Amino acid sequence: MNFRRTFLTVIKYRNYRLWFFGQLVSLFGSWMQMTAQGFLIFELTRSPAYLGYVSFASGLPAWIFVLYGGVIADRMARRSLLLITQTCMMFLGAALAGVTFSGHVQPWQIIVLAFCLGIANAFDAPARQAFVLELVEREDLTNAIALNSTLFNCAAMVGPAAAGLVYAWIGPAWCFVFNSVSFAGIIVALLLIRVKAKPAPSPGPSALAALVEGLRYTASDGIIRSMIGIVAATCLFGFSFTTLLPAWAVHVLDGDAATNGLLHSARGCGALISALLIASLGRFPLKGRLLMAGMFLFPVVLLLFALERETWLALVFMAGVGITLLLTLNLANVLLQTHVEDHVRGRVMSIVSLTHFGLMPIGGLLAGLAASAIGEPATVMASSVIASACALAIWIYAPQVRKLA
């Protein structure tokens, strides 16, 4: 692995360095909150269905707002939009900490705050993904996208483990406090970033017309359609198992909050390995074949995880799940972003964000309801079978994917 090439983007661009390290601090806190929030609502309800309800509430705003968020990301300064969304997320983390410290936290309060966080994410996600091209030159975009994933998964590896320890030691409210404070990292970074001034956009078409233009552009391009289809299948049937990890830690592995944190961290560790691999590949010409390999290997490793009852082996298989799952999503994102044209980038990324943040909660809701009916292991096994069928369908009906460089 060529680490010099992998980290070229971070070394070369001041703006990207600020973004990278600001995001690293903020995402660490976000993973602490996500992990603690899931275990807290499971402790309050002892119901895997409620895990699905929280997941669904956090993703529902994507269906309502994220496409419009893409139009906004193409029409206003993305740095300014990100400052607004990140500040809102900081206050929502503080609100969750407050109700938890009160000792009277209720499941409905967690669900409502998850919904509000989803609204902020709906405007944040397309702007955040499109903003990367303002921080680096186009020839370094693949590196930048892969390193964005690297920092996300660094946080995903360390944050949940820290959340499990903090939760067991001094309680979930402190996880939420740390998340709120951690947003200072990205807010300060955004204030320090200096992007090139752009001419004010012309009035152009209405927001609705601009949205329709983005949808038509996406629908007319076979490669973009295929990448979005892969993201859709992965988020709906692949990521859904993560919703069940708090229940899995208790019901399947006879563990506690620390076990839940370790499961999340093992997935994050595997995802980090995947992100570093992609970043080190640089201009590797067989990305399409590697993407298909990830799609076929993911359900195999997921099935092995579902069959395992020893905690240490479950963690090993969970790391394998992280490697293959993020290999699929990261390469799909890289191939899509290097293909899409700049003038519709925000709108196309809003469609990707809708696919990601809209379908993942639906998958989580279905997984939670299924686990309540047939149990967690059977639910994850079913997800493995469906993910295999999706990989086969892409192989048969979208042969252009494995030819992509």
Image (cartoon, rainbow, N blue to C red):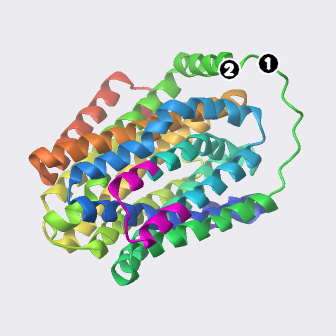
- In the picture, the disc for residue 210 is 2
Which residue is at a point 53% across and 71% down the rendered structure image? 177
Which residue is tagged 1?
204
**Sooner in the amino-acid sequence: mark 1 or mark 2:** 1
* Residues drawn in magenta: 94-112
Judged from the image, the secondary structure of the residue bearing numbered disc 2 is helix
State the image quarter where residue 220 is shown: top right
Most common SS among magenta residues: helix
- Image coordinates of residue 3 in percent, x first then y, are 59, 67
Tag 1 and tag 2, C-beta contact below 8 Å: yes
Q: Residues within 10 Å of mark 1 (few under 14, many from 20)?
A: few
282 is higher (above) or lower (below) than 210: below
Q: Residues within 10 Å of mark 2 (few under 14, many from 20)?
A: some
State the image quarter where residue 263 is shown: bottom left
Is 385 on the left or on the right of 152, as rendered?
A: left
283 is higher (above) or lower (below) than 225: below
Which residue is at a point 71% across and 53% down the rendered structure image? 83
- Image coordinates of residue 236 in percent, x first then y, are 33, 38
**Is 169 covered by the magenta stretch?**
no
State the image quarter where residue 185 is shown: bottom right
Judged from the image, the secondary structure of the residue bearing numbered disc 1 is loop
